[in-house]
Amino acid sequence: MALIDTHCHLDFPQFDEDRDQVLQRARDSAVEKILIPGVDLATCRRAIALAETHEDVWAAVGIHPNELMDISSDVLGQLSGLANHPKVVAIGEIGIDLYWRKKSQSDQERDFRAQLAFADASGLPVIVHDREAHEPVLRLLRELRPAGGVVLHAFSGDARMAEDALTLGFYLGVDGPLTYKKSDELRAIFAQAPLDRILIETDAPYLTPVPFRGKRNEPAHVRLVAEALAVIRGTTYEAVAAATTANAARLFRWESPVC
Ligand code: NI
């Protein structure tokens, strides 16, 4: 049963030594697509270059809130050129990060707004990064509501925020932390959320699921997230794989395979 890793930084230097083997292990684990979000202009270009040379790799373009780069009209112009590439299926990852706080909250809000407006105009869905920034992220998304749809990547809010996000029509992304001992609240949220609104991700090289926690994460491990989700929901791995693959195809507008 095929899986899609909808968030993986396969272009990062952590994969420079063995990227082909990592991709092969993903294919061996039935991962049929890998979506690489950009974090700055260089990584956006690298993600696109990988997507051009690998049929199962796709790209998203955007400037991460931890990048010390203002979203000027020049940057937006460059992003817009990149977003026209046929293998770019989303804008991201963009958002607000109040844990690292590389820029002030007001600067991050300004830049998030600018990229949300750009995403809305492009019609592409948005991959949202929210670290300890639940209130401003939800407030701006509610206000600007990009037409192409939204996934809250590596969802880390509470049950109330999940409910609000689902009411707004957003998808919730879940990663390795679902397998961590202390993640009871996260498991309760993902046991309840409608299965047709969940995307599975690795965020590799980060957020490695148990039993590989502490090591570099890789897209093959998205399978462990799917398996954990099946256990939590009392359903089968096949049901989770089929639903999350269909969800990703719907949000990122991948055609379903012709039978
Ligand atoms: Ni990420």
Image: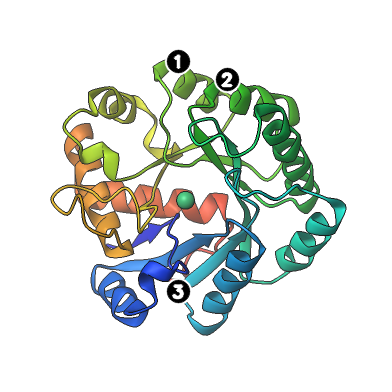
Work out whether mark 2 precedes mark 3 in sequence or the reverse, and give the earlier one.
3
The Cα atoms of the two marked residues, 3 and 1, are separated by 36 Å
The Cα atoms of the two marked residues, 1 and 2, are separated by 11 Å
Asked whether, in this view, residue 108 is left or right of residue 192, the answer is right
Look at label 1 and name its amino acid.
Answer: Arg
SS at badge 3 = loop
Work out whether mark 1 precedes mark 2 in sequence or the reverse, and give the earlier one.
2
| Tag 2 and tag 3, C-beta contact below 8 Å | no
Q: Nearer the viewer, mark 2 or mark 3?
A: 2
- The residue positioned 42% from the left and 59% from the top of the image is 8
Crowdedness near tag 3: few (<14), some (14–19) or many (≥20) residues, C-alpha within 10 Å: some
SS at badge 1 = helix
The residue under label 1 is 160
> In which quadrant is the C terminus drawn?
bottom left
Which of the 4 image quadrants contains residue 28?
Answer: bottom left
| Tag 1 and tag 2, C-beta contact below 8 Å | no
Mark 1 C-beta closer than 8 Å to ligand 1:
no
SS at badge 2 = helix
Work out whether mark 3 precedes mark 1 in sequence or the reverse, and give the earlier one.
3
- The residue positioned 57% from the left and 73% from the top of the image is 46
The Cα atoms of the two marked residues, 2 and 3, are separated by 35 Å
Look at label 2 and name its amino acid.
Answer: Glu
Report if residue 234 is visible in the image. Answer: no
Q: Where residue 93 sits in the image (x, y, percent)?
A: 57, 49
The residue under label 3 is 56
Crowdedness near tag 2: few (<14), some (14–19) or many (≥20) residues, C-alpha within 10 Å: few
Mark 3 C-beta closer than 8 Å to ligand 1:
no
The residue under label 2 is 135
Look at label 3 and name its amino acid.
Answer: Asp
Report if residue 135 is visible in the image. Answer: yes
- The residue positioned 70% from the left and 71% from the top of the image is 85
